[in-house]
Image: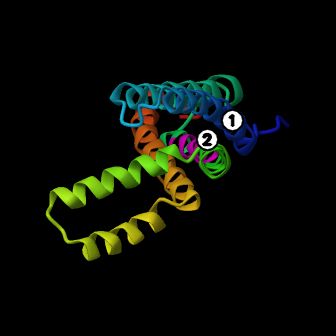
Amino acid sequence: MEQQPSMLRSAMNYGAIIGLALIAISLVSFLIGNYESKIMQYVSYVAMIGGLFWAIKSFRDKENGGFIAYSKALGFGVLTALFFGIITAFFTYIYIKFVDDTLVQYALEQSRLQLEKRGMGDDEIEAAMQMSESLTSPGFIATMALIGNVFIGFIISLVIGLIVKKEDTSFN
């Protein structure tokens, strides 16, 4: 009897590769200091889309006998996104906490500028900034990165699953 491929192990492997690619893109963005670069955001999305397409299609062709149901393609894509999300969240936490917190300082400066533009008083600005500081902790940012990656991976996998699904009709 032929052993079924391990979806978990495959998702971990593909997730690690995609995660490393996303980390490389993040490092470039951090090093150039352009935290609002639309180009870098688009490059990240292209890496996610291309990586998930490659992962799901490779899983279908190499490890699943050339067939995959839509639900399995979706599940595999989300599981892969979970793993690259964990990797990028861990990187984000370590980078912001121990290497460079410039991103956090930049976000706080932008928040303060927006509050001042609204004409808020000093007491209101300080209260709002205390709230902003709690939302810019490395742990919170890493958690949001994980949730965001899994959500975006889910949306991407919904579409990719439709494209790469191939039902085994040999028993019909």
- Over which residues does the magenta segment extend? 74-85
Give residue 80's position: percent from left, percent from top: 61, 41
Residue tagged 2: 84
Above/below status of 167 relative to 134: above
Tell me the distance, in whole angstroms, between the alpha carbons under discs 1 and 2. Answer: 6 Å
Q: Nearer the viewer, residue 24 or 136?
A: 136
Residues marked 1 and 2 touching at CB (< 8 Å): yes
Q: Position of residue 93 (x, y in %)?
A: 62, 51
- Label 1: how many residues lie within 10 Å, few (<14), some (14-19) or many (20+)? many
Residue 90 sits above or below residue 12 on the image: below
Q: Give left or right: position of 96 versus 136.
A: right
Instruction: Check disc 2 and give the amino acid type.
Output: Phe
The three-letter code of the residue at mark 1 reads: Ala
**Where is residue 56, by image quadrant?**
top right
Question: How many marks on residues?
Answer: 2
- Answer few, some or many: residues within 10 Å of disc 2's Cα (few below 14, many 20 plus, some between 14 and 19): many
Work out whether mark 1 precedes mark 2 in sequence or the reverse, and give the earlier one: 1
For numbered disc 1, what is the local secondary structure?
Answer: helix
User: Could you tell me which residue is drawn at 82 percent across and 38 percent down?
Assistant: 3
Q: Is residue 104 visible?
A: yes
* Circle on res. 16: 1
Q: Residue at x 54, y 28 (%)?
A: 31
Q: Residue furthest left?
A: 119
76 falls in the magenta region: yes
Q: Quadrant of residue 2?
A: top right
Residue 71 seen in this snapshot: no
Rendered position, 95 above or below 27: below
Q: Is residue 61 left or right of residue 129?
A: right
Residue 10 colored magenta? no
Residue at the location (41% across, 31% down)? 34
Q: Residue at x 59, y 46 (%)?
A: 92
Q: Quadrant of residue 111?
A: bottom left
